[in-house]
Image (tube, grey):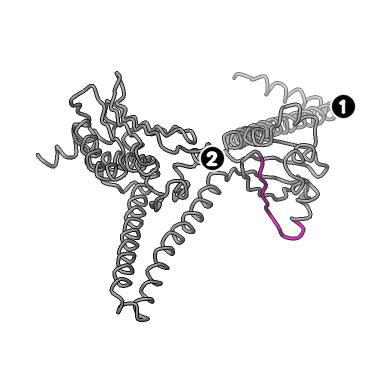
Amino acid sequence: MVLTPTAVGAGVFLLLGTLTPLGALASAFAGLAVGAALALHLASTLHAGIEETENELRDLIDENFSETIYEKNKLETILRYMTDGTVAVDLEGFIIHANESARKILRMTDDDVRRKGYDDIILRFTDDLTLAAILDDLESGETGGSFSYGGATYDVSFGTFKDSYGDDGGVIIIFRDVTESQELRNIQAEFVANASHELKTPLTSIKGYAETLLAGGIDDPDMSKMALDIINKEVDRMKRLVNDLLQLSRLDANRQTWHMRETDVIALVRMAAKKQGVTAGGKRQQLNLLSKDKSFVLTIDRDRIEQVVTNIISNAIKYTREGGRIDVEVVRDDHWLYIVVLDNGIGMSERELSRVFERFYTGNKARSGEMSGTGLGLSISKKIIDEHGGHIVVQSELGHGTRVVISLPLKPPKNAEDSQEHMADSNA
């Protein structure tokens, strides 16, 4: 029979238990041993639980911290690359944050952001958007405004943000550059007004002479002929205006059809000048074509470029006095072909020169001594040349003539190549 240490221990306690008072003392020690073991077990279990909970809390904190950092970085990136300027201001007027766009719009330096209040910055541009004014607007339900500075226009929107306790912590102000859209709205409004005026003028004339005929003027052969002749001219003028408006609309909407083909530019310019020769001859003007090349082939839309050249030569004839001279020259270098129209006419002032490409601008009709056109010719010409990848420049001095230079690239623009490929596919 083999006795284990446990059995031996138990036997010892049983033996001591029969002895008094040694037995009582042994029993007491046994109880203490069991309690200590239980306490140690409970402490160990509690420590393990606390450690596990601590690890879980640490993981949760790390996860929440990572998400907070991620959201912060994302928000900072969004604000950094926003084209709209964003400024956060606390209720005491100190700038909490200003993104890069806001710093550019409001001309703020890092030192401005650190040391100056919001009002110090905004008062450089307007006194309508101070913090007090914004808070008053918000209280009355207004959430935006605008201001202009240095030729630019800005729309401004604002609203309050809350702090960690749910109270108003300050104001977020957003600045948006609307200069281009405002200019576009102004151009559209001006375009409609000018088009209406240009159409109203011939319509008024037509109605007036029609009423004259109806009132008995039709019985007067001379009056009838004069009235019908004016009505016919005014109808032609309206027709030209409508056609120009339609073409300009197509060009603006990129709906113009381009027929890009290899074309002899010298022959094209010669033909355009020849068509205007009768008009120039009527004013006893010299119209000369100058070119070292007999011919030169370029990929262009023949009809559209002829339209441009014809328009430029026609303007030169119109604004050159009788007996004047107009030279049309074609030259080129390694990259460009130039069509130059030079006249010794009445020229233009600096103010007129700055407006020549404006729609409906017709120059000084009194000085030209002739009925003006639609005022759309140069606008259309510029768009046509732009589509060919070229440039059109007008140089002039009052009383000393005008020089117009049309530049066309020797290498066809991409839309020309695409057009040729499309035509080749269609022919195949």
Task: Tell me what residue is drawn at x 27 percent, y 25 percent.
Answer: 410
Which amino acid type is shown beneath numbered disc 1?
A: Leu
Magenta run includes residue 141: yes
CA distance for labels 1 and 2: 121 Å
Which amino acid type is shown beneath numbered disc 2?
A: Arg
Query: Where does the image place residue 175, in percent across and percent down from the top left?
Result: 64, 43
Q: Which mark is residue 25?
A: 1
Q: Residues within 10 Å of mark 1 (few under 14, many from 20)?
A: few
Query: Where does the image place residue 163, in percent across and percent down from the top left?
Result: 76, 45
Q: Residues within 10 Å of mark 2 (few under 14, many from 20)?
A: few
Q: Which mark is residue 369?
A: none
Task: Tell me what residue is drawn at x 31 percent, y 76 percent.
Answer: 220
- Considering the image in quadrants, where does the N terminus appear? top right
Give the residue at the far right of this rendering. Answer: 21
Select label 1 or label 2 by which is in front. 2
Query: Where does the image place residue 215, in percent across and percent down from the top left?
Result: 37, 81
Reading the image, the residue beneath label 2 is 351
Which residue range is magenta in the image?
138-149
Magenta run includes residue 371: no
Q: Earlier in the sequence, mark 1 or mark 2?
A: 1
Secondary structure, mark 1, is helix
Task: Tell me what residue is drawn at x 34 percent, y 58 percent.
Answer: 237
Q: Does 195 sit left or right of 266 as displayed?
A: right
